[in-house]
Structure formats: C-alpha cells, structure tokens
Image (spheres, rainbow, N blue to C red):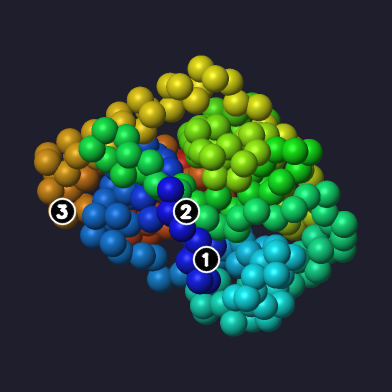
Amino acid sequence: YGTVPVAPSSGPSSSGWHRLETAEECPRKFAVFYVECLQPPKMSTALARGSLIHEAMKHHYGQMAKQPWAIDPIEAMWKAPPDISWTFEECRSIVDAYRNWYKNEPFEVLDIEREFEVNIGQYKFTARLDLVVKEGGTAKIYELKTGSELRGVREWKRSGQIIGQCSIGRALFQGLYNVPFGGLVINGVRTGESRDFKRTPIEISDASMEDWPRSVYYWYQQIDRNKAEFGSDAWNWPQSHKACIGRYGNCALYDACDKGRFMSADWEKKAHA
C-alpha cells in the first residue's frame, strides 16, 4: 500500500477501477483518455460538481483529524482548479448543508484519500479510499458518492470499485490500523432539487471478493489486446454505441466521435423514451 502524501489528492487513483470501467464501457473512450491522454474542453456539470465536493470533504475531514494541510472546505473549493470551481456556488450550499447534517460524527478519522497499490499478476492496480474511520471497534471505508440520482444497494454490491475496496480492506486493515475491517459505507450526497444525505452500509460476499482479482486481470488483458491490435491512435479503437448517452447525459466524446454523431437522433429518442 502507498503512504499518505503531504496534501492527498481527491481525484481518481493513478491506475484504478475508473480506467477498467471506462475500458469496459467503450474501448475508444478508454484510448482517448488513457492512451492518447486527451481531455474534453470542459467537464460535465455532474463530474465537476462531484470533484469539487470531494475536494471539500477532504479538507472537512482533514480538519477533523487535525491534519496540517487541511484548510476550511469552502476556501478549498474557492481555490480549486477552474475546471471544477465553476460549480462553486451550488457546491457551497451542499457542503454547508452536509456539515450541518452531520454535526457530530460517530467515528475517529484514520485516513483520508489514501492510495493503495495491489499487484494482480503483472499489473499494478491502485485504489484511493475517500475516508477510513474507526467506528465500533473496526476500520470502515466511507465512500463518497454524489449525484441527482444515486445507485441502489444491488448496483453497489456488483460494482468492481466497491468490491475492490472491500478486498483491500479485508486484506490490509488489521495490520495497518490494528482493528479488523468493518465494511464499507456509501456516503451518499444527493444533489439537485431533491437534495439529501444518506449513508448505506454495503455488504460484499466473500465469493465476490475472491473473484474480483480475476475480473481485474481480464480487463487489463483486454486492454493489452486492444493496444496490440489498434495501436496508439485512439480513433482506430472500436466504439461502443451503448456508451453514447449514459447516466449523466452525453459521453464527453459525443461531438467528436463520428459514430456518436451519426446515431445521435436515434439514441436521443431511446434515451428519453
């Protein structure tokens, strides 16, 4: 596992599930972001808002743990990079409401945005845990999720990201924190008009955790096969039309991808039917 940096990042881990999930969603999207390392000119509102709230929570719990790098969460959002800080006004009210909702937290903060590293075959997999706390004599993961609509328990129990985090907790927490792993809690922040806050424990079966490394290995192998077949030009990689319109609207490559443009009328109708 890695060590906590002086100022931990609240972004995705360096080689984590978000990459594998993108590869599964659409090979071309993976190639654009992680082979050619291209980025869209502007983040979606949902992603920018979620990223800014993550940054605020990092400092909120950093202050609770008396970390020297932590500053006021509202100030941290104001100082965030422009690609996410443009959602500041909305996020400020959300963060203020969250802090008021959870005035008295029932736990002790153990770690914030710590990146763990696992070797799976020849591949390095990383996972950044938003928050690890000591609660009820165990070490629990609190995974922050934001959005106008949040997934249900069944979806989270099938999520490779969540299964992987629980696998890491089960394997390492006793030795690292001197208390057993106590499970994972989705720290849900519902944005928009129906704003609310809900914490949901997620129980992952032993079978799911044991099968997780095989799934990770499969997707790394699939990425290697695509690189060998389609090379470094992302636009040679196959595109999945099912990814054109997703949970949070159009894919970031929607306007740039030929197939996405050609299919836009049909997919708009299906998405909003």
Residues under labels 1 and 3: Cα distance?
31 Å
| Element marked by disc 2 | strand
- 23 vs 142, left or right, is left
| Residue underneath mark 1 | 8
Can residue 253 be seen in the rendering of this structure? yes
Amino acid under disc 3: Ser
- 162 vs 152, left or right, is left
Of the numbered discs 1 and 3, the one sitting upstream in the chain is 1
Of the numbered discs 3 and 2, the one sitting upstream in the chain is 2
| Residue underneath mark 2 | 115
Amino acid under disc 2: Glu
| Element marked by disc 3 | loop
User: Which image quarter holds the C terminus?
Assistant: top right
Instruction: Kindly identify which numbered label has been placed on residue 86.
Output: none
Residues under labels 3 and 2: Cα distance?
28 Å
Q: Mark 1 and mark 2 in contact? Answer it, CB < 8 Å.
A: yes
Residue occupying the point 26% across, 33% down: 121
Does residue 3 lie above or below 170 as drawn?
Answer: below
Residue occupying the point 27% across, 51% down: 31
Within 10 angstroms of label 3, few (less than 14), some, or many (20 or more) residues?
Answer: some
| Residue underneath mark 3 | 232
